Amino acid sequence: MKAPLFLKDKWLYISLGIIILLIIIGFEIVFHSLDSFTRHGEEMDVPDLTGMNYEKVQTEYSDIFHFQLVDSVYVKDFPEGAVYQQNPKPGSKVKKGRNMYIIMTSVAPEVVRIPNLRNLSLRQAMVSLNSVGLKVEKLVFVDYFARNAVVEQFVADTVAEPNTELVKGTGVTLHVGLGTGDKTTHLPDIVGVAQNVAKDRINNASLNLGTEIFVDNDEPENMIVCKMEPEFDPNTMVELGSEVNVWYKSVKTFDLKWYKLEKHRRDSIVERLRVRKTDPEKIKYVLDSFNYILSHRSFSFDPEQRAKDKEMMFEQVDDSDDLYFNDNEEDNNYFYDE
């Protein structure tokens, strides 16, 4: 069978070649245009604008970023009208034309009125203060028949009468009643809690925030409590108004998932022992051992430190308890293995 005559026409192949060439050129033009439009490969480092006058920043960087003012806040001892926070953060890789979201400091402080907190419960007083943008500075417990009832409110050792104007964010010292009965309270378990929540948790437990120690250098929103002193124990009671010292680490270095897993295993095993009506002294030994591990492990993502932490093993309690605490048994493996 002979091939059709048009297949022998050389102009057919010349035409096909031209068409294919035009298609390839078309694709090249399209991709080149996309690269130019998206500025592919033209990323730049975001400069640190913090502390710079916002108007000056807009003038100097208007050809690089589209600025969006998100909010303005009053920050004591910080330049007025300056960039306080920026997003994207300094050092980020972005392309020109990116939106830059700015929080700047206000020229004048925002003023609010302190509510009447007298005779409110401590919890109600904290909610009222937070609702107007004020905060608890310190709790001072005084002789008064109603426990945790607010007796008086102070700002810088001066009585703050209701409706007094204060700069937003001012700390208020509350004098709170001791009550007539027991004058102790339980410690809150705040390990793993965010930095901006820790103080409220401590105050809600009728205690004061003591020394704050920052193990890592990171943004406040990334900091969580990695250690507290006194150490948390559900059976430990402390005096009302006692101080709780707090250590913070970044979520980038503190393995919170692993820490929570270890806490869950502690609680599960202790509960199993209680159900079996194990000797209370033995339960206390198990609980103390776990608490020691929880307070002395670093819960770090670093491989070398994780290996050191893994060496902290919990010994078997008793053959009769059928609890074998070693890493060879998957069900009872305390060490969080990613």
Image (spheres, rainbow, N blue to C red):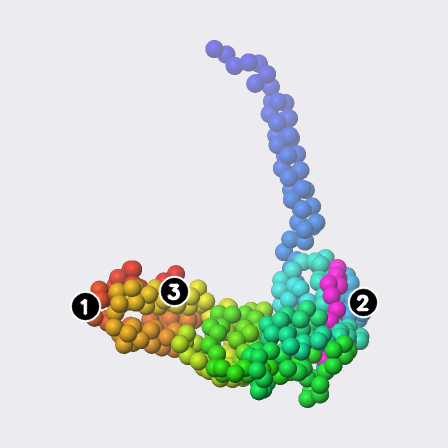
Q: Residue 131: in sight, yes or no?
A: yes
Marker disc for residue 59: 2
Residue of label 1: 319
Q: Quadrant of residue 320?
A: bottom left
Q: Residue furthest left?
A: 319
Q: Find residue 92 and report its horizontal and vertical position in percent.
A: 62, 64
Helix, strand or loop at label 1? It is: helix
Q: Residue at x 49, y 82 (%)?
A: 181
Helix, strand or loop at label 2? It is: helix
Task: Tell me the kind of residue under disc 2.
Answer: Thr
Q: Magenta stretch mostly in which secondary structure?
A: strand
Marker disc for residue 137: none
Residue of label 3: 264
Looking at marks 1 and 3 on the same chain, the residue that comes earlier in the sequence is marked by 3
Magenta stretch? 66-76
Q: Residue at x 52, y 75 (%)?
A: 205
Task: Tell me the kind of residue under disc 3.
Answer: His
Q: Residue furthest top?
A: 1
The crowd level at tag 2 (other Cα within 10 Å; few <14, some 14-19, many 20+) is few
Q: Is residue 182 above or below residue 1?
A: below
Task: Tell me the kind of residue under disc 1.
Answer: Asp
Question: How far apart in space, not on screen, are marks 1 and 3 (Cα)?
Answer: 23 Å
Looking at marks 1 and 2 on the same chain, the residue that comes earlier in the sequence is marked by 2
